[in-house]
Image (cartoon, rainbow, N blue to C red):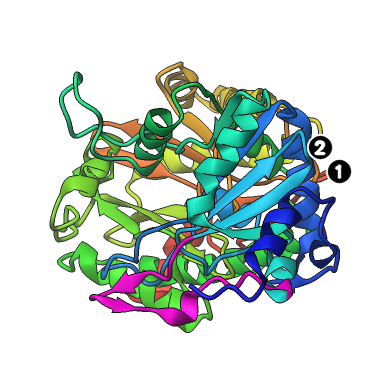
């Protein structure tokens, strides 16, 4: 690795006030380093007693991935979406940020010198850190701080815990966050380890105007991809054909690829228990769509380091049957009432309550509707799921209430007999309501049937 500053200068920089290089404002995808410094300030103020360690993604992309994807928390607090293997250390008591840089990575056995991290003023400015040091200096630095009385190390956690892939009385052999913690615990036995994940989720819950602009673009890309996936569905064709249409639409519309591999699951595969099996199935649960069944189309496109997420339910035959139409339109009524309730300061539970209330109210129209409405609002009825959208297409809600700037996906799910129903859009919360970020999509049963008749029937 190349270091352009003398090592003595680098070491001294760690103990100086914020470096001049980190003061100059730069931008990446419209997000400024000043914004990143504000994010770190919130993190430091909440965890002022310790050291916060955030990892970059240290592995090359899988051959099947459309592009390499940076670790979300590292990217969020550095803007470095193209730097593998580095560690950001935020020293809260000292009010300093240090980037520990590894050797340039190798792929196919070939070193990639273009990915050397340069310890110079330009790179320090770009990443808004006070110093860039070789990664071998990380442990001595931490040990020095532990000896000085800073005893707590704060680490991030994954949104979903991966399998251990080892007996319970052995160290885990899978899960990068788990492996990282195990390694640190072995190297630093006197340190105390705590999670910083909930604080990060809280900070990420409210998007800046620059982030909202990126997500607005991704919402548009994702809407186009959804329409492409819907248009590819017909009896006798395969799920893989619809998946290919979604991925192609993301790229054609200007995104960098899908933010997650498309879920275009039909019939029994649209039920959540079978749907998640696709993560461990070599064919991704591929099958032919059958006339009369419904398809869950859940897709998103990524660009500029951020994701997207949107979805609909599609009748393979192009038309809902009477019961499917009745359920779907009830779901849409509840969904829209939840959206209408959204604004700054409204709780997530209040949104769900508004959706349930609207369904019960609509059910008063007839005895048959009333019975169906009662089933849909029961505790095991519609799952009124809501999550954030940002650097990850699915982010854990950082608070129990909505804030101006929150970007979310509201995605009710309901299973009735053989059918699974699914609806989702991206919304930006404003002081008085919401702005739709996935525009131009059919929603009611009549709109969906009309779209399908025009697009491919």
**Discs 2, 1 touching: Cβ within 8 Å:** yes
The residue drawn where x is 19% and y is 25% is 170
Residue underneath mark 1: 431
Task: Determine if the magenta segment contains residue 27.
Answer: no
Question: What residue appears at the point 46 percent right and 37 percent down from the top-left corner?
Answer: 159
Q: Kindly indicate the quadrant of the structure image that contains residue 268.
A: top left
Residue 407 percent location from the top left of the image: 67, 49
3D distance between C-alphas at marks 2 and 1: 5 Å
- Give the magenta range: 102-121
Front-lying residue, 115 or 174 = 115
Tell me, for residue 344, which label it has, or none: 2
Q: Secondary structure at mark 1?
A: loop
- Provide residue 3's location: percent of width, then percent of height: 58, 73
Q: Secondary structure at mark 2?
A: loop
Residue 319: quadrant of the picture? bottom left
Identify the residue at image location x=45%, y=29%: 382
Q: Position of residue 440 (x, y in %)?
A: 60, 67
């Amino acid at each position: 690795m190349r270091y352009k500053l003398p090592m003595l200068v680098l070491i001294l920089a760690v103990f100086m006030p914020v470096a001049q290089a980190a003061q100059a404002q730069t931008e990446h995808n419209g997000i400024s380093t000043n914004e990143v410094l504000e994010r770190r300030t919130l993190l430091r103020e909440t965890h002022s007693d310790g050291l916060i360690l955030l990892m970059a993604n240290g592995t090359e992309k899988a051959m099947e991935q459309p592009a390499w994807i940076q670790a979300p928390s590292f990217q969020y607090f550095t803007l470095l979406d193209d730097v593998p293997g580095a560690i950001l250390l935020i020293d809260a008591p000292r009010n300093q940020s240090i980037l520990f840089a590894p050797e340039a990575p190798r792929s196919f056995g070939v070193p990639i010198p273009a990915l050397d991290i340069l310890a110079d003023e330009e790179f320090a400015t770009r990443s808004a850190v006070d110093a860039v040091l070789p990664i071998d200096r990380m442990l001595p630095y931490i040990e020095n701080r532990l000896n000085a009385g800073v005893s707590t190390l704060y680490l991030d956690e994954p949104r979903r815990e991966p399998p251990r892939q080892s007996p319970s009385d052995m160290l885990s052999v899978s899960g990068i966050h788990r492996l990282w913690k195990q390694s640190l615990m072995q190297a630093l036995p006197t340190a105390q380890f705590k999670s910083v994940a909930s604080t990060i989720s809280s900070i990420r819950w409210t998007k800046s105007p620059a982030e909202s602009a990126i997500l607005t673009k991704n919402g548009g890309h994702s809407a186009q991809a959804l329409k492409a996936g819907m248009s590819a569905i017909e009896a006798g064709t395969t799920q893989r054909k619809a998946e290919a249409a979604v991925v192609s639409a993301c790229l054609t519309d200007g995104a960098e690829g899908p933010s997650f591999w498309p879920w275009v699951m039909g019939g029994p595969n649209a039920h959540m228990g079978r749907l998640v099996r696709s993560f461990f199935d070599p064919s991704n649960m591929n099958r032919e769509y059958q006339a009369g069944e419904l398809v869950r189309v859940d897709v998103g496109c990524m660009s500029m380091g951020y994701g997207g997420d949107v979805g609909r339910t599609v009748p393979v035959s192009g038309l809902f049957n009477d019961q499917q139409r009745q359920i779907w339109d009830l779901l849409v009524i509840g969904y829209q009432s939840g959206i209408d309730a959204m604004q700054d300061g409204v709780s997530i539970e209040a949104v769900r309550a508004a959706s349930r209330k609207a369904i019960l109210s609509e059910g008063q129209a007839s005895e048959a509707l009333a019975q169906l409405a009662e089933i849909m609002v029961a505790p095991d009825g519609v799952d009124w799921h809501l999550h954030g959208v940002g650097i990850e297409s699915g982010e854990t809600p950082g608070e129990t209430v909505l804030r101006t700037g929150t970007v979310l996906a509201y995605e009710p799910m309901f299973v009735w007999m053989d059918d699974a129903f699914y609806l989702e859009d991206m919304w930006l919360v404003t002081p008085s309501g919401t702005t739709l970020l996935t525009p131009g999509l059919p929603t009611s049963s009549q709109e969906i049937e009309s779209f399908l008749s025009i697009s491919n029937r």
